Image (spheres, rainbow, N blue to C red):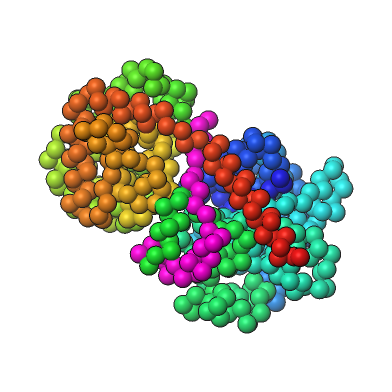
Amino acid sequence: MRILLCASEIMPFAKTGGLADVAGSLPKALAGLGHDVRVALPKYALIDETRFKPEKIMENLNLPIGEKKEKAAVWLSEAHHGVKAYFIDNPRRFGKGPLYGHPDDAERFILYQRAVLKMLSALVCQTDGGRAWQPEIIHCNDWQCGLIPLYLHLERERVYPEQRRRADALAEIASVFTVHNLGYQGNFPPEALQAAGLPAPFFTAEKLEFYGSFSFMKAGLLYADIITTVSPTYAREIQTPQYGERMEGILSLRRQRLRGILNGLDYEVWDPSRDHYLSSPYSADSLSGKIACKKALQARLGLPQKEVPIIGMVSRLAAQKGFDLLEQVLPHLLRMQVQLVVLGLGDKPYHDLFKRAAKAHPECVSANLEFNEELAHQIYAGADMFLMPSRYEPCGLGQMISLRYGTLPIVRATGGLADTVEDYDPTTKKGNGFRFQEYSAVALLGAIVRALFAYQDRSAWQVLMKRGMQSDFSWQASARKYEQVYQEALRLGQKSTA
């Protein structure tokens, strides 16, 4: 199949979170299965052109943004593991600052989405260098791409008769929309509807109006041929008021087209036997390197080099990730024979919490309030346990990485955490980690205590480590499921144009 994956961030070009990892890894896995996969993202200022060497293939694309026209260019790079990358270039919109959080975010991502479709219309006619190309599937990710399924729907409906040739080119493309985190919805003031070129009748509760706002996320949910999210459990959870972020009614309405596919891991990046960030690589067959990695982590962070369990966390510091629970149990944790290592950025109250804890207890708390890829790898390798007490977690990669590195996860049973971590039963010896159900400090502390107790049996713990390291969370199985979803979307899309 010919597949275009659209996302606002894609590794290795631009990243703020897990979306970039998925949008970078899935195309590689699909290409490995023989598909013609390409990606498209904005050309942010932070993208390293010297590394990826993009060349300009289109310029002066005229794009309507409300009553005005803006121009965009398209650049192409072939430096991403055989997956071509298109960059949508508009220096005014993407040439400065962070990826998100701008006052004009609505206009920025309207421009990006309209430019992608304009680019595809032009690529159909492209003859220079044999660049003519048309995808059968556009895989849209999160709210920044939520309008693309709607625009494709309008093309099928021939809403733009003056652009009939363009409509013919785009009407046969099927759309898949993936929700990575329903909490981020792209809700904007009603006037953004005009900027998107949509008529006023679309601003109704049955269409794009969402509690007084115009919702990009809602557009994707309503108009995509297939909706996916990043774990089977999260697909069920988001149809309930507890996890639905007020979108549960829409998701229940479209539940026949909703699929949950667990994210995978890029095993070229996450492999303790050949991880260049580690001083002592190791594998399930030879665990001595993990002991050396633990000592190296303690040395790097200035923690006493003694044999106590290290609990690691690599996370955004936010209440969603369970830091409100951790704040409640921290005084108890500090009285135990453990070392706590935290890496991440986020909300100021949690920054202050860990700064205070590290200052008061430097022998057992290391607070690293930064984004540091090298240290993240070293924590996964050097820690004994990995803590993810999330309020909700659509998929989570941290628990999969920690299992791959023989670091046993302690998680709340929600979303992808419930799908990947089986609670350890000391009687049957089954399981690969430690889970708790209730979102409470008592339940969290109970899971930590169970993990610390299990850690005392070193032979049983080593069996658990090896079991986790031998789990298969590679992208191959997930990519096969996306193949099936794409084929289903094509069939449904063809019915829509019949």
Task: Identify the residue shown where x is 82% and y is 69%.
Answer: 163
Q: Position of residue 340 (x, y in %)?
A: 24, 38
Point out the residue furthest to the left here. Answer: 335
Q: Is 48 on the left-hand or right-hand side of 345?
A: right
Residue 318 vs residue 452, the one in the foreground: 452
Relative height, residue 494 to residue 356 (above, below): below
Figure quadrant of the C terminus: bottom right
> Residue 115, can we see it?
no
Q: Position of residue 436 (x, y in %)?
A: 26, 48
Task: Identify the residue shown where x is 61% and y is 47%.
Answer: 484
Q: Is 354 on the left-hand or right-hand side of 230?
A: left
Which quadrant of the view contains residue 164?
Answer: bottom right
Relative height, residue 116 to residue 201 (above, below): above
Figure quadrant of the N terminus: top right
Q: Which residues are the magenta region?
A: 242-269
Q: Position of residue 354 (x, y in %)?
A: 25, 47
Relative height, residue 220 to residue 448 (above, below): below
Which quadrant of the view contains residue 362?
Answer: top left
The answer to whether residue 361 is magenta is no
Task: Identify the residue shown where x is 15% and y is 41%.
Answer: 334
The answer to whether residue 247 is magenta is yes
Q: Where is residue 473 in the image (x, y as percent from the top left)?
A: 47, 36
> Residue 270, can we see it?
yes
Point out the residue furthest to the front here. Answer: 428
Point out the residue furthest to the right here. Answer: 127
Which quadrant of the view contains residue 392?
Answer: bottom left
Task: Identify the residue shown where x is 29% and y is 40%.
Answer: 423
